[in-house]
Image (cartoon, rainbow, N blue to C red):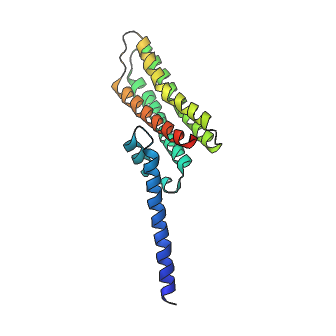
Amino acid sequence: MASSPIFLLLLILSSTLLSVKSNTTTIESTCKTTNYYDLCVSALKSDPRSPTADTKGLAAIMASVGMTNATATASYIAKNLTATANNTVLKKVLKDCSDKYILAADSLRLTIQDLDDEAYDYAYMHVLAAQDYPNVCRNIFRRAKGLVYPAEISRCEVSLRRICVVVSGILDRLAE
């Protein structure tokens, strides 16, 4: 009888380890369908919800990563860049850019809602919108004579675009 509790404990531990190993495999196989495997794996493995998430949950987690990125970028533009701008045209352009990143975050929030509703076409549409808002920011700068697109915003644009491409890749897997 003394070995029975030990056997039970070993059984529970091995099943837990298999579950974690299985989900690591789920993350890796899901990320292989995306264009940015390393970004995907890194982001998903760093989120505590990932070990228990299915593919739809992993898509929601990546959309949440994008929301955080877009919100942080909007805040950065509004607080750091706009505050130091002397030119009124530059201030307006920066305000418009900050607003576009807020819209990107809203689109990713809607993506998560669409995933909950299993409305994958709408989720995909919202991810594409989120991916395009930073491009609108770049175009606003192009139209303003004499303004240079800040390197900091360019890096943020690339980062958000890659996150959105990862979300789109995971959504493609859900549509199969």
The residue at 49%/69% (across/down) is: 15
Q: Is residue 86 above or below residue 45?
A: above
| The C terminus lies in quadrant | top right
State whether residue 111 is above or below residue 18: above
- Residue in the image at 34% along x and 25% along y: 151
Residue 99: horizontal and vertical position, in percent? Answer: 52, 25
Q: Nearer the viewer, residue 48 or 52?
A: 52
The residue shown at (64%, 38%) is 119
Query: Looking at the image, which residue sits at the far front?
Result: 176
* Residue 98 in view here: no
**Frontmost residue, 137 versus 89:** 137
Q: Residue furthest bottom?
A: 1
On the question of residue 83 being in view, the answer is yes
Q: How many marks?
A: 0
94 and 170: which one is in front? 170
Q: Residue at x 46, y 61 (%)?
A: 20
Where residue 162 sits in the image (x, y, percent)?
A: 42, 34
Which of the 4 image quadrants contains residue 123? top right
Question: Where residue 130 appears, x then y in whole percent?
Answer: 52, 30
User: Where is 48 relative to 12, above or below?
Assistant: above
Q: Residue furthest left?
A: 151
Q: Farthest residue to the right: give it.
A: 117
